């Protein structure tokens, strides 16, 4: 790693100052370091064009949401990324502000691992044409509007019929995204480097419709009926596309995984215990 790109959260002066301090610190250590503000999404339903990233590694200053945004901008680039959380401990941005320089010093000296996190390629097909495509790290969510009626979703796996969901929506999550919306909807926690896709219905009409874990090689097709109204596909909770009746959403493993740099001091199980407050007694 010789060229380091630092991307900091938009609208956070403290993040901008830390980025400048990091860039100066890295330059003193002999690295080529540049810093810039994270690019915002151009709108709820239109992701920005991928920006140039001439770097050997990317350091993200912000929270998990900022890292998800940057991961989307990475596209198919094979650049490792590490996250520094400016708030509480994150599932993706595991390095704390307090340990930032110490942990990054260890990372740059080789004391780190690089995890391959699978991503999903999500597309919308309408009348035989692909009208939307996105790569996601956490999840793709088909959900109805606040006042819309329940949605009907015919679901096939590898062209074999799975079931007909009647629900408020459906989540397709990666193992990395299993601790995001999937967890809130009652889905399972899956170790982040596992190779799997989790399908979790949101408030299903039939209570026997439970989450299912599928092989990473599965191709999932979800088709709306001809009466669907006010239904949206949302990718990583940040970018989406309005769906139309009879649209088909196709979800498959992306050929481009995300390389996530893990500091040696980080322990996923400790993060679970801390974030989910496992083993802590409840006040009476």
Image (cartoon, helix red, strand yellow):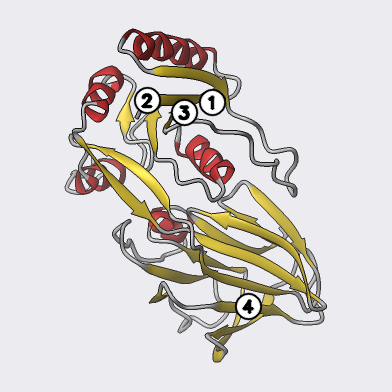
Disc 3/disc 1 C-alpha distance (Å) = 5 Å
The image shows residue 25, relative to residue 190, as above or below, that is above
Query: CB of mark 3 within 8 Å of CB of mark 1?
Result: yes
Q: Earlier in the sequence, mark 2 or mark 4?
A: 2
Q: Secondary structure at mark 2?
A: loop
Residue that carries the numbered disc 4 in the rendered image: 222
User: For the point 68% across and 38% down, which residue is it?
Assistant: 41
Q: Earlier in the sequence, mark 3 or mark 4?
A: 3
User: For the point 64% across and 30% down, which residue is it?
Assistant: 39
Residue that carries the numbered disc 3 in the rendered image: 62
Q: Secondary structure at mark 1?
A: loop
Q: Position of residue 176 (x, y in %)?
A: 39, 55
Q: Earlier in the sequence, mark 3 or mark 2?
A: 2
Q: Earlier in the sequence, mark 1 or mark 2?
A: 2
Q: As drawn, is 21 to the left or to the right of 51?
A: left
Nearer to us of marks 2 and 4 is 2
Q: Earlier in the sequence, mark 4 or mark 1?
A: 1
Q: Secondary structure at mark 3?
A: strand
Disc 3/disc 2 C-alpha distance (Å) = 23 Å
Q: Position of residue 232 (x, y in %)?
A: 71, 61
Q: Nearer the viewer, residue 174 or 105?
A: 105
The image shows residue 14, relative to residue 222, as above or below, that is above
Which image quarter: residue 187? bottom left
Q: Is residue 147 visible?
A: no
Quadrant location, the N terminus = top left
Residue that carries the numbered disc 2 in the rendered image: 2
Disc 1/disc 2 C-alpha distance (Å) = 23 Å
Q: Nearer the viewer, residue 139 or 273?
A: 139
Disc 4/disc 1 C-alpha distance (Å) = 34 Å
Q: Secondary structure at mark 4?
A: strand
Residue that carries the numbered disc 1 in the rendered image: 9
Label 4: few (<14), some (14–19) or many (≥20) C-alpha neighbours in 10 Å: many
């Amino acid at each position: 790693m010789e060229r380091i790109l630092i991307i900091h959260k938009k609208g956070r002066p403290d993040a901008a100052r830390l980025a400048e301090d990091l860039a100066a610190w890295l330059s003193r250590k002999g690295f080529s370091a540049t810093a810039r503000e994270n690019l915002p999404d151009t709108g709820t339903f239109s992701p920005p064009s991928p920006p140039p990233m001439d770097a050997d590694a990317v350091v993200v200053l912000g929270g998990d949401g900022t890292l998800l945004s940057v991961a989307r901008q990475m596209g198919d680039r094979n650049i490792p990324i590490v996250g520094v959380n400016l708030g509480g401990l994150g599932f993706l941005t595991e390095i704390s502000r307090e340990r930032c320089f110490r942990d990054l010093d260890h990372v740059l000296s080789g004391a780190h691992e690089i995890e391959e996190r699978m991503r999903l390629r999500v597309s919308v097909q309408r009348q035989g044409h692909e009208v939307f495509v996105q790569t996601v790290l956490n999840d793709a969510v088909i959900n109805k509007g606040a006042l819309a009626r329940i949605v009907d979703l015919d679901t096939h796996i590898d062209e074999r019929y799975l079931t007909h969901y009647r629900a408020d929506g459906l989540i397709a999550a990666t193992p990395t995204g299993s601790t995001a919306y999937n967890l809130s909807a009652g889905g399972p926690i899956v170790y982040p480097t596992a190779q799997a896709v989790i399908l979790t219905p949101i408030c299903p009409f039939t209570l026997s419709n439970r989450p299912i874990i599928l092989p990473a090689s599965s191709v999932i097709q979800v088709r709306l009926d001809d009466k669907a109204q006010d239904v949206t596909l949302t990718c990583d909770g940040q970018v989406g596309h309005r769906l139309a009746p009879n649209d088909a959403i196709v979800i498959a493993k992306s050929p481009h995984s995300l390389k996530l740099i893990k500091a040696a001091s980080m322990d996923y199980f400790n993060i679970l215990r801390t974030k989910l407050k496992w083993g802590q007694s409840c006040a009476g």
